[in-house]
Image (cartoon, rainbow, N blue to C red):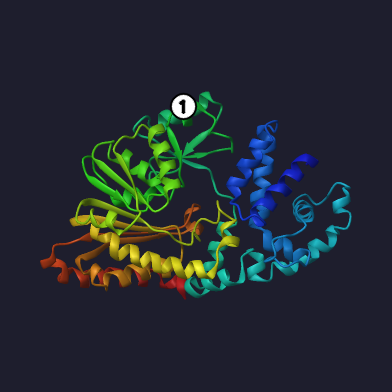
């Protein structure tokens, strides 16, 4: 395909913003699109697709031209040239690309694919971390997560049905399809298009939400009229799904430490026509203490490394640092111990992450159940959703119930047995 210089220069500027200025890919792309109002849908699609793929394969591209992948202030035009040389097998005669020898690149590519960290384009420490915890399974997951994410939306059942939404999209010349009965509200775009400029989005008929992410609220099992706390609500994707499952009846208290994300949730609730959400900014521990023993359902969509979402967030693997991994594990443990007190006896709590690592998932739950705060809980169910098996983001979901004090001790053994049985089920993946 013909490369247009203005688009390639735009890609280089976005890469500079991501790697040198530390911005997230989606933010940088959106900023560039606002600057380049004359770019059409095809131009924007070309730029976005190639930015994400270059970010995804950053380490491998750097390896091909013998530059350190950890040093992000690179010759971005050369990086782009190498990418298109491998992708297309040829390059236009631009001055910036005159010294790129395509035959040598293909020879070097054979070597790259024999080095796991380079083949999967991942940093050494993240590759080692995943290998320790997931063994051979890690390579399978990395291979799956290096495939571009599918565009999945959730039909807002307060305003429409999946079948109605499919027909409404047809009127916009956009084809979407159902996935499976496991994801009843999920629809997948057959071909990528900008769906956020449509009236369907502006009127709140759907939200962007990965298919496996949509299972989290299902596991929570909220009912109309309940009092539900979404304790790590963020921008509220799961909050809105919970509201739809509750038929907009009852109360949802959405908590988060980041006010900016809660403001985004406020905008999204208006668009989705949801009016049962109370938004509260966590400024101190008093906010949590006032809510002790008050929730019928409690969702802890915990902060995590996000290592299950590299399909759609490939820049995350270059921004992640060991100190954050260590800090986030401590945060997860604190959230489980402190926030779990907001649940009523007999209530249901879901702990979820978009990480694949047992240290953020099963091991956290096992430690929580053995803690003083966890003694009144029993584990009902847990599930790890793997990109290699589902094709969507990786998630871990644990369902726990808060039991009566008199029954708590008898339930602990049952919970531990469930955890041990789950470990036995996944042993083949860990060996």
Mark 1 lies on a secondary structure that is helix
Residue 178 located left or right of residue 70: left
Quadrant of the image containing the N terminus: top right
Task: From the image, tell me which residue sits under label 1.
Answer: 167
Give the vertical position of 378 relative to 214 (above or below): below
Q: Residue at x 25, y 51 (%)?
A: 297
Q: Total number of numbered labels?
A: 1
Spot occupied by residue 99 in the image (x, y as percentages of width and height): 88, 58
Spot occupied by residue 29 in the image (x, y as percentages of width and height): 63, 44
Give the vertical position of 319 relative to 40 (above or below): below
Spot occupied by residue 121 in the image (x, y as percentages of width and height): 64, 63
Q: Residue at x 62, y 46 (%)?
A: 28
Q: Residue at x 48, y 71 (%)?
A: 134
Spot occupied by residue 347 in the image (x, y as percentages of width and height): 20, 55
Residue 339 located left or right of residue 144: left
**Outermost left residue:** 406
Q: Residues within 10 Å of mark 1 (few under 14, many from 20)?
A: some
Give the vertical position of 46 relative to 346 (above or below): above
Residue 88 located left or right of residue 299: right
Q: Nearer the viewer, residue 325 or 428?
A: 325
Residue 375 located left or right of residue 28: left
- The answer to whether residue 365 shows anywhere in this view is yes
- The answer to whether residue 136 shows anywhere in this view is no
Q: Nearer the viewer, residue 362 or 114?
A: 362
Q: Residue 264 sits in which quadrant?
A: top left
């Amino acid at each position: 395909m013909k490369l247009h210089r203005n688009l390639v220069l735009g890609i280089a500027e976005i890469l500079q913003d991501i790697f040198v200025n530390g911005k997230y890919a989606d933010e940088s792309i959106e900023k560039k699109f606002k600057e380049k109002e004359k770019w059409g849908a095809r131009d924007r699609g070309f730029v976005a697709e190639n930015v994400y793929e270059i970010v995804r394969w950053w380490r491998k591209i750097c390896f091909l031209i013998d530059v350190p992948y950890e040093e992000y202030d690179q010759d971005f035009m050369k990086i782009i040239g190498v990418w298109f040389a491998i992708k297309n097998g040829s390059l236009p005669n631009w001055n910036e690309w005159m010294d790129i020898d395509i035959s040598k690149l293909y020879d070097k590519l054979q070597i790259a694919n024999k080095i796991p960290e380079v083949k999967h384009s991942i940093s050494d420490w993240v590759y080692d971390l995943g290998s320790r915890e997931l063994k051979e399974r890690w390579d399978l997951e990395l291979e799956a997560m290096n495939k571009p994410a599918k565009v999945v939306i959730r039909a807002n059942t307060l305003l429409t049905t999946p079948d109605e939404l499919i027909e409404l999209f047809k009127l916009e010349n956009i084809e979407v399809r159902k996935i499976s009965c496991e994801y009843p509200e999920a629809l997948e775009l057959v071909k990528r298009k900008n769906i956020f400029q449509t009236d369907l989005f502006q009127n709140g008929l759907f939200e962007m939400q990965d298919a496996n992410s949509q299972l989290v609220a299902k596991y929570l099992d909220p009912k109309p009229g309940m009092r539900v706390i979404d304790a790590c609500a963020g921008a509220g994707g799961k909050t809105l799904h919970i509201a739809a499952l509750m038929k907009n009846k009852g109360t949802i208290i959405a908590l988060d430490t980041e006010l900016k994300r809660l403001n985004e949730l406020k905008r999204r609730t208006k668009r989705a026509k949801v009016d049962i959400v109370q938004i509260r900014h966590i400024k101190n521990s008093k906010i949590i203490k006032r809510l002790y023993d008050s929730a019928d359902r409690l969702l802890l969509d915990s902060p995590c490394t996000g290592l299950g979402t590299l399909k759609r967030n490939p820049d995350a693997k270059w921004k992640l640092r060991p100190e954050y991994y260590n800090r986030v594990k401590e945060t997860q443990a604190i959230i489980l111990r402190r926030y779990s007190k907001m649940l009523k006896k007999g209530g249901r709590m879901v702990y979820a992450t978009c990480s694949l690592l047992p240290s953020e998932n099963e091991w956290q739950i096992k430690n929580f159940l053995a803690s003083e705060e966890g003694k009144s809980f029993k584990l009902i169910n847990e599930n790890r959703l793997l990109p290699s098996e589902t094709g969507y983001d990786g998630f871990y979901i644990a369902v726990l119930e808060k039991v009566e004090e008199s029954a708590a001790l008898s339930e602990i053994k049952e919970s531990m047995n469930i955890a041990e049985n789950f470990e036995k089920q996944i042993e083949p993946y860990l060996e």
